Amino acid sequence: QMTNAWEQDVLDGQTALGAAEGAFRKLAIPGTMALLANALGHLGRVDEAHALALQTLAGARQHGLRKGECNCLLHLAVIASRRDDYLDAYRCLLAALPIADELAEAADQCVARANLASCLLLFGQPDAARPLAEAATRMARAIGMRSAEMSAREFLSRALLDLGDAPAA
């Protein structure tokens, strides 16, 4: 991604150095901040993680960094889940999905769809969860994301069971 961002900026007429600085600013900084927020969440420092992710999201939006915005929204969804705020997680995932689709980021598309399916199952909507879980399963298999495929299959099975289709589950 970093090389692609650099190459695109060079093709747009920037100097190699300017393109390198831009690629770092666009990808490395938001990505690092999102990872730090995720680490804080894993350490149980959820409020700090939430604040950092919100700050990083604002910066990504201010600078038009769509990939960074998508990453922050996906991390905010995880943080919301850790706070048992599944409505906020759902909102973050709904905001992340069109960005992932726009950028054609298969991993982000898969994660957003699988986690949306999970939220919809929690909300008692297996009929809406099923197509998302099916799509996430196909995407994960296509790009070799085994752990994401297992999660998506689990959500698909739960949706099918809730819909009364045990043989398909």
Image (tube, helix red, strand yellow):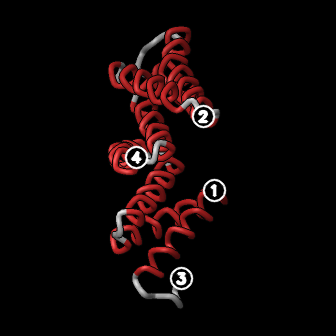
Lower position in the chain sequence, tag 2 or tag 1: 2
Residue 117 seen in this snapshot: yes
Lower position in the chain sequence, tag 2 or tag 4: 2
* Residue at the disc numbered 4: 85
Q: Distance between the residues labelled 1 and 4?
A: 27 Å
* Residue at the disc numbered 2: 44
Residue 1 seen in this snapshot: no
* Residue at the disc numbered 1: 145
Mark closer to the observer (4, 3): 4
Nearer to the camera, 8 or 153: 153
**Crowd around label 1: few <14 · some 14–19 · many ≥20 (10 Å):** some
Q: How far apart are marks 4 and 3 (CA)?
A: 28 Å
Q: How far apart are marks 2 and 1 (CA)?
A: 26 Å
Q: What element carries label 1?
A: loop
Lower position in the chain sequence, tag 4 or tag 3: 4
Check disc 4 and give the amino acid type.
Asp
* Residue at the disc numbered 3: 169
Q: Are marks 2 and 1 in contact (CB under 8 Å)?
A: no
